[in-house]
Amino acid sequence: MSDRMEQLIQEHRLIPPGSTVLCAVSGGADSVYLLHRLYCLRRELDFTLVAAHYDHRLRGTESTQDAKFVEEFVRLCCPAERLYTPEGSGKELPGVRLITGGGDVAGEAARLRQGLEETARQMRYVFLQTAAQEVGANLIATAHNASDNAETVLLHLGRGSGLRGLAGMPPKRGNLIRPLLTTSREEIENYLRYRGLPWREDATNRDDAYARNRLRHQVLPVLEDLFPGFLSRISQTCAHLREDEDYLSSLAAQAVESARWEGEDLILPAAALADQPQSVAIRGARMLIGSMTAGNDNCAAPHLEGLLNLCRGSDPSARLDLPGGLTARRRYGELVLSRSAPTPLSPRDLNLAGETRAGDWTVRCLPGTYQGERQSPLDCWLAQEAAPMPTLRPRRTGDVLAPPGRHEKSVKKWMIDTKIPACCRDAVPVVDAGGTAAAVALLGPHRDFVPRKGQLSWHITFVTPDYLAH
């Protein structure tokens, strides 16, 4: 059978020995293939494998059945095994552990006034990053394949895109790896059928109301018919374009390497960008914004152009407002990037059956019975017995936090470790129970306040302000 996946892993060194890989599994053919192939490869590549499934709660009983299918597949097809050396000694490989989670995607999409697909993606990746942190996984594997990549490139081409968009999805970005980017959907299904492995079909994948599905069903088959081997060649083209993108980005990094911090402001000589060719300058501007927003550099072209115009202009005091609470201004020969000051957070009562506005944050609290739901940095459950009348306040000197399964340390150190900007830390809501930090937004609950299954609890959700969302 196809070994494209293994070739891609080796070519890009996606999984170093000793890694722990969290594999996202929806139950569809792609993710089932990825999980099973990783399960087999862990023997020779020497890594630990954990599976993760997120329930978007968009398809009623079908979503529930997907979750049950993944649980059964992991149990039956990814069990513990013992490997024997030629000398006869054995090594135990544990079975794959499954982490599950879920969220009200439809409700969150309505609140944010954005599409279901984008909201589902955001919530799913928050879950995956949280789960990876929980199990100590340094890598998250997703099942984007060659067909997905081709669809992405065509969508970017149709909407208008720069080189980064036309290069498609990279095999690795941060702790995210995509081992299937050169493997076609046909190869995946052939593998599963050959081995008699089941998978679940999502009915929405057949709905051509979605642009991606129309490309998949109507455009890609025509292109493959006109140009046999189209998927393979577009994968190669993407790889070449990524090399060009990486080179231009390296020049941009050199252009902005003189940037320095003054407190929470990022300062750069304006000429460092103004004197660069447009292709390098625009990437440098994006990097500066990413430095200010914990890596969220998805800024629209007009804002990037505006930032460059600020650098190239003659007004020594010009100013530009950017998304995410950022401000760019000229200080004579320098470009200064600043964050908008967060709204101060003062102690207040917590509405125990609704929403409470706390500075720039919204905190939702509802009573309920804990049924083992997943605890996360923005969505947690606190036992009513331990916190009968919780309130909200900013952090205090001496606050400590011990998230479930992790050691105790000061809230300040947790905030530093999770890269919460210093200027924002005093605006982060703390749920107080009798003077103790029972939970902290962006960090999660204290283990002493986590309820037992069936216990009356407070379900608390923190809604992140725009300047921290990424």
Image (spheres, helix red, strand yellow):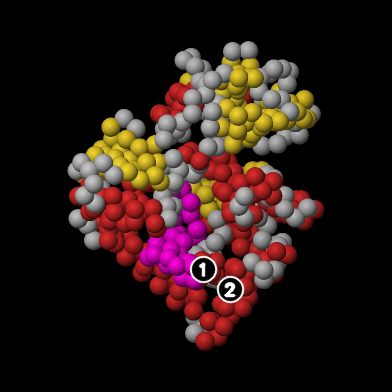
Mark 1 touches mark 2? (CB < 8 Å): yes
What residue is drawn where x is 54% and y is 20%?
346
What residue is drawn where x is 64% and y is 34%?
461
- Above or below for 69 versus 185: above
Rendering coords of residue 80 (x, y %): 64, 47
What residue is drawn where x is 45% and y is 74%?
234
Observer-nearest residue: 446 or 45? 446
Magenta span has 163?
yes
Q: Which residues are magenta?
A: 155-179
Q: Return the residue at label 2.
A: 215
Give the quarter of the image for residue 280.
bottom left
Rendering coords of residue 262 (x, y %): 28, 32
Q: Earlier in the sequence, mark 1 or mark 2?
A: 1
Number of numbered discs: 2
- Above or below for 65 versus 465: below
Name the mark on residue 155: 1
- Above or below for 94 versus 371: below
- Label 1 and label 2: CA atoms lie apart by 8 Å
> In the structure shown, which secondary structural element does the residue marked by tag 2 occupy?
helix
